[in-house]
Amino acid sequence: MTDAERLAILGPDIVASIRARVKEAPEPSDELVEDLRRIMTRPAGEIPAPRPATDVRPAVDAA
């Protein structure tokens, strides 16, 4: 979404209040940035090793 689209949807007063709140927020700590970087690069955690496929074909009767 562009700034112009955001401004058209929310209006100038809301956009100004959002920007003011963002300026009040403290800078993130180095630890937080590192934690977020790790989450964003591997959101599901470690990738499990592949397993051999199981045979799902029905057994053939020997009768």
Image (tube, grey):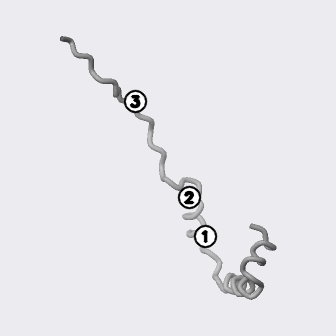
- Please state which amino acid type lies under the numbered disc 2: Arg
Nearer to us: label 3 or label 2: 3
> Farthest residue in the right direction?
4
- Residue at position x 40%, y 34% from top? 51
Query: Which disc, if any, is residue 48?
Result: none
Query: Which disc, if any, is residue 38?
Result: 2
Is 29 in front, or is 11?
A: 11
Is 14 in front, or is 46?
A: 14
Q: Secondary structure at mark 1?
A: helix
Percent x, y of residue 46? 48, 49
The N terminus, quarter of image: bottom right
> Farthest residue in the top direction?
63
Percent x, y of residue 34? 58, 64
- Please state which amino acid type lies under the numbered disc 1: Asp
Percent x, y of residue 17? 70, 87
According to the picture, the residue beneath numbered tag 1 turns out to be 30
Query: Which disc, if any, is residue 52?
Result: 3
Position above or below: 2 against 18: above
Nearer to us: label 3 or label 1: 3
Q: Earlier in the sequence, mark 3 or mark 2?
A: 2
- Please state which amino acid type lies under the numbered disc 3: Pro
Residue 25's image quarter? Answer: bottom right
- Residue at position x 34%, y 28% from top? 56
Query: Alpha-carbon distance for marks 3 and 1?
Result: 41 Å
Q: Earlier in the sequence, mark 3 or mark 1?
A: 1
Q: Earlier in the sequence, mark 2 or mark 1?
A: 1
Position above or below: 46 against 26: above
- Residue at position x 60%, y 67% from top? 33
Q: Residues within 10 Å of mark 3 (few under 14, many from 20)?
A: few
